[in-house]
Image: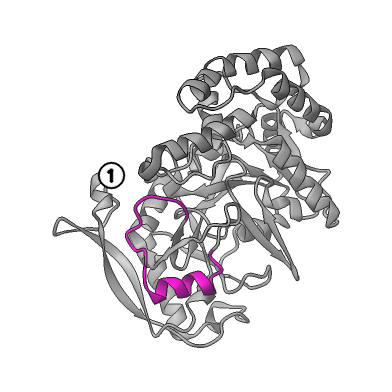
Amino acid sequence: MPALVLLGAQWGDEGKGKATDLLGGSVDYVVRYQGGNNAGHTVVVGDQKYALHLLPSGILSPGCTPVIGNGVVVDPAVLLSELSGLNERGVDTSKLVISGNAHLITPYHQTLDKVTERFLGKRKIGTTGRGIGPAYADKINRVGIRVQDLFDESILRQKVEAALHDKNQVLIKIFNRRAISIDQVVEEYLGYAEQIKDYVADTTLLLNTALDEGKVVLLEGGQGTLLDVDHGTYPFVTSSNPTAGGACTGSGIGPTKINRVIGILKAYTTRVGAGPFPTELFDADGEALRRIGGERGVTTGRDRRCGWFDAVIARYATRVNGLTDFFLTKLDVLTGWEQIPVCVAYEIDGKRVEELPFSQTDFHHAKPVYETLPGWSEDISKAKTFSDLPKNAQAYVKALEEMSGAPISAIGVGPGRTETIEINSFL
C-alpha cells in the first residue's frame, strides 16, 4: 500500500490537524516528518479540543500508530509534558514510536534562539524561541545530539562538550550571558532516557515493513510550504522542509512509495511571524477574519496575520509539492461577506505576474491583483454534501480549485470532526 503525504499549502496553520485526524481512522500510521514543538495542531473531537505541538495528530485515533520520524527535532521535556497531558485526559499514548535518529533540542538551543532573535532587532525572523533553528543547525554542523545518544552516557557527554565548547564562548563574549553547565545538561538528559526508552525504535524499518505488509502510512508535515527553508519565503521560514520532498528524508520512506500528496488550504490566508504577505489586511475585514476564524497561534499564542485567499501561492504549492488534492478548510469563516476578493496575480513594478517570483526583492514589492467573487449569508456548518452548499459558496470553491491547479477533495465547514464535506476519498 502506498504512503500519503499531508502538508500545508500556505504559511502553516491551515488546519492540518483536523485533516490528519479525519484520515487517522483509516490509516495505520501517522508520521510527523519535520519540525518540532514550534508547530501546533488543534483537533476537535466531540466537545473536546486538543492542542498538539510535537505529537502526531494520529495519537487521537484509536488503532493508529503515531510516529515521530527522524526528521523531527524533539524537546524531551515538551514531549513528556504533552504525553502526560493527554494521559490525564484519558488518551492512550502507549503506541507512540520515536525515531532513534531524531535530534534533540537542548537548553542551549533555546537560549541561543532567544538571544539571537533579540540581537537581530528589526531584522528578527519571528521564531518561536523554542530552539528549533539552532537544533537543526547543530544537526547540519554534525554536532547534534540524537535520541539514541541518551542511552550511552559517554557519547552524550562527548557531544554536549563538543557543542558547548564554542556556544559558551558565544554566549559569554557576544551576548554577555552565563556559560551553560555541561554537567547539568548531561544529568538532565540522562534522566529522560528511562522515561522514553520504550518509545524508541528504528522507525525507517518499521514504516517500510508496514508498507510492504499493505498498511497505510500518512506522512504529516508540521508547517506550511511557504515556510520551507528551501522553497519558502526565505529567510522568514522554518529550519526544515515541510514540502513533500521532506517527507521522504524525514521518514526514511522512498518517493516511489508515495502516491498521493494532499495540500491543506485555508479558504483565506494567514501567517504568523515576520515576512512578506501580499494579501495581508489591516482593516475591519482582517480583524473579522481573525475573530471569526479564531486566528491565534496554537503554539505561540500570537495573533495570526490575516488576508484574502492567494491563488498565486496555492499554484506554487501545487507545483513544488506535486499536489494531487486539496483539503479546503474554514470555508464557514467567510459566511456573511457580500463580496470576497481573491488574489489571482501580483503587480510588481507595474507588471502583472501570475507565478510566485523567485526574487526575494520582487516578492517584498508584490501587490495583489484581486478578482471579486459573490459571497453568501447562509449557515453552511450543517452541509454534508457539496450540493448542500449555497450556490455562491459552490462557485467560490470551484473558482479556487481552478486557480490552484489541483482538485479540492474535501471542505471544512466547521471546526468539528464531522463538519467536513468529502467530495473524493483520499484513500
Q: Quadrant of residue 41?
A: bottom right
The three-letter code of the residue at mark 1 reads Gln
Height in image: 267 above or below 117?
Answer: below
* Residue 358 visible, this orientation: no
Of residues 202 and 338, the one drawn nearer to the viewer in this rendering: 338
Category of crowding for the residue at label 1, using alpha-carbon neighbours closer than 10 angstroms: few (below 14), some (14–19), many (at least 20): few
Residue 392 as seen in the image, left or right of residue 291? left
Count of marks, rendered view: 1
Residue 363 at x, y = what percent? Answer: 27, 50
Seen from this angle, which residue lies furthest left? 350
Q: Position of residue 38 (x, y in %)?
A: 58, 45
State the predominant SS element of the stretch in magenta. Answer: loop
Q: Secondary structure at mark 1?
A: helix
Instruction: Please name the residue shown 60% across and 62% down the image.
Output: 425
Where does residue 352 sit, x and y in percent of width and height?
Answer: 18, 60
Residue 203 vs 185, above or below: the answer is: below
Q: Nearer the viewer, residue 232 or 316?
A: 232
Q: Is residue 155 above or below residue 109?
A: above
Quarter of the image for residue 124 reads top left
Instruction: State whether residue 246 appears in this view.
Output: yes
Quadrant occupied by the N terminus: top right
Give the magenta range: 272-295
Residue found 46% across the figure and 63% down from its top: 407
Magenta-drawn stretch contains 240: no
Image quarter of the C terminus? bottom right
Q: Which residue is mark 1?
A: 360
- Residue 363 vs residue 114, the one in the foreground: 114
